[in-house]
């Protein structure tokens, strides 16, 4: 049992705690999963996992070069969106990986002693990588190593406060939030005609996008592209002509220069 626990902790360390493992009844590994990728071949599993975990740590290191929100490029690189632990966790928490989260999976976590890192690294790994505004309290050494409980005790009051979304969130995380709002409508709202409208993870970045139409004539709406938001609202409004709120929103988007 101790060997299994050590193995699980090692998977957690290598994958920045994004890996999940499922065991067979005899104790053998059925698969290891990260994001929507499963490693099932026992002869290739270790090599494939290590390659994937290397990309995760590379994405983490890339994001750690950002010290404030203004450092981020106009679009967060696809590599970071796909492989960064914060984005993988965000997709999972938002329900985009429900098809992969199966009963019996074990979340691979690091040993507690491995979780200590600098405040600057916590800030980058959890907030800046996603495109959320940085917060550095006065009289705090950003390079001082702290446990996660200490970091959250410092940051939580700031996160709970009121903020201007446009000033404190990168356009890509705003797009993620909007996509997820529509995902929840697609999943739960029966009052709208949403026939043929689905969501999926974009192939290169694993960023969630909305698709609509038939297989022969399918449209993709990636809300990281501002015009896609208006196009999608217009599409949904065309399917729900009696919905006054949608018609009003579509009308506003049509006024935007370059909408068509």
Image: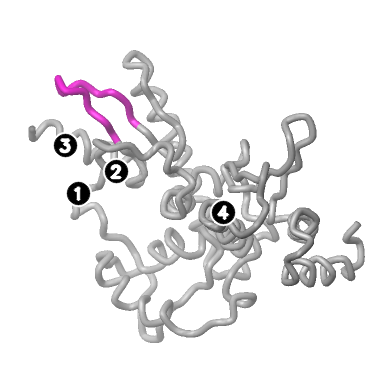
Tell me the tag on residue 6.
Answer: 3
Vertical arrangement, residue 161 with respect to residue 228, above or below: below
Q: Secondary structure under badge 1? A: loop
Q: Which residue bears the numbered disc 1?
A: 111
Q: Earlier in the sequence, mark 2 or mark 3?
A: 3
Q: Which residue bears the numbered disc 4?
A: 183
| Residue 39 lies in the magenta stretch | no
Callout 2 crowding tier (Cα within 10 Å): few <14, some 14–19, many ≥20: some
Q: Who is closer to the viewer here, 178 or 134?
A: 178
Q: Which residue bears the numbered disc 2?
A: 13
Q: Earlier in the sequence, mark 4 or mark 3?
A: 3
Which span is picked out in magenta? 21-32
Residues marked 2 and 1 touching at CB (< 8 Å):
yes
Vertical arrangement, residue 125 with respect to residue 141, above or below: above
Q: Secondary structure under badge 4? A: helix
Residues marked 3 and 1 touching at CB (< 8 Å):
no
* Image location of residue 255, percent across then percent down: 89, 70
Callout 4 crowding tier (Cα within 10 Å): few <14, some 14–19, many ≥20: many
């Amino acid at each position: 049992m101790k060997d299994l626990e050590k193995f699980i902790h090692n998977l957690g360390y290598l994958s920045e705690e994004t890996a999940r493992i499922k065991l067979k009844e005899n104790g053998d590994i059925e698969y290891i999963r990260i994001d929507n990728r499963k490693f099932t071949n026992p002869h290739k599993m270790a090599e494939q996992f290590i390659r994937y975990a290397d990309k995760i740590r590379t994405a983490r290191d890339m994001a750690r070069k950002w010290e404030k929100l203004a450092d981020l490029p106009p679009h967060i690189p696809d590599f970071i969106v796909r492989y960064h632990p914060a984005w993988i966790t965000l997709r999972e928490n938002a329900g985009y990986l429900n098809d992969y989260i199966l009963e019996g999976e074990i979340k691979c976590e690091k040993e507690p002693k491995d979780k200590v890192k600098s405040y600057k690294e916590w800030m980058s790994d959890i907030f800046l990588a996603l495109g959320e505004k940085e917060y550095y309290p006065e009289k705090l050494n950003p390079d001082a190593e702290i446990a996660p409980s200490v970091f959250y005790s410092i940051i939580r009051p700031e996160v709970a406060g009121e903020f201007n979304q446009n000033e404190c969130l990168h356009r890509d995380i705003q797009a993620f939030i909007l996509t997820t709002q529509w995902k929840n409508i697609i999943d739960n709202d029966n009052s709208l005609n949403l026939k043929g409208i689905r969501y999926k993870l974009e192939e290169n970045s694993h960023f969630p996008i909305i698709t609509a139409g038939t297989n022969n004539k399918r449209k993709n709406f990636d809300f990281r592209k501002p015009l896609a938001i208006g196009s999608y609202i217009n599409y949904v409004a065309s399917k729900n002509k009696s919905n006054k709120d949608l018609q009003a929103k579509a009308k506003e988007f049509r006024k935007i220069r370059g909408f068509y």
